[in-house]
Amino acid sequence: MAQPEKSDSTQAREYHVIEVFIGNLLRVCVIATVAVVVFGAGVYMPSAYSLHPAYHKFMGEPAAFRSVGGILGAAFTGDGKAIVQAGLLLLILTPILRVTVSVFAFLYEKDYLYVVLTLIVLGILLFSLAGGA
């Protein structure tokens, strides 16, 4: 037996549920980012207060802070600077999650043109984060 077609109000409710989910996802990610960065700053600031930077000499980031694994590893040891950077990584992850959820939402809606376009956007985001060329 064939399934009945969805009414316009049912489709509108489904779209609204997806929009609310994406909005809540963005909200949670931004709040989590703020919480992680503020916590990291609270850990980092007392030790950084007594440091006197040498502005006449350029010092790059330590090797541990040049990769995601290094940042997360240092953050889990309690390094305040690494915790702040982990919060910024979470902020970078937010649009990637949003686009990924959109791919699944468009798949659910069977809107394959937007699935392809959203996958292209996701590919561009991931390519640019990987260092681009």
Image: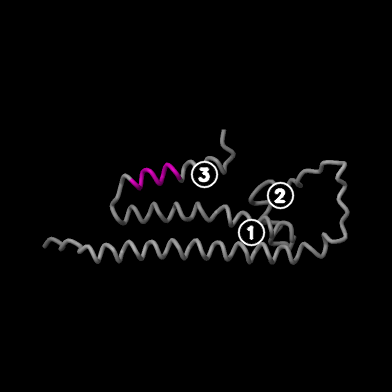
Apparent side of residue 123 relative to residue 52 in the rendered image (left or right): left
| Distance Cα–Cα, label 1 vs label 3 | 18 Å
Apparent side of residue 58 relative to residue 22 in the rendered image (left or right): right
Dot 3 lies on which element? helix
Residue 114 location (% of width, % of height) = 34, 47
Mark found first going from the N terminus, 1 or 3: 1
Up/down of 6 relative to 130, above or below = below
Mark 1–mark 2 CB contact (< 8 Å): no
Residue 10, quarter of the rendered image:
bottom left
Question: What residue does disc 1 label?
Answer: 87
Give the crowd class for mark 2: few <14, some 14-19, many >=20 residues within 10 Å.
some
Which part of the image, by quadrant, shows the C terminus? top right
Up/down of 90 relative to 125, above or below = below
Question: What residue does disc 2 label?
Answer: 65
Dot 1 lies on which element? helix
Question: What residue does disc 3 label?
Answer: 126
Q: Amino acid at mark 1?
A: Gly
Up/down of 130 relative to 111, above or below = above
Range covered by the magenta-colored residues: 114-121
Residue 105 location (% of width, % of height) = 36, 56
Which mark, residue 26? none
Q: Amino acid at mark 2?
A: Phe
| Distance Cα–Cα, label 2 vs label 3 | 20 Å
Residue 1, quarter of the rendered image:
bottom left
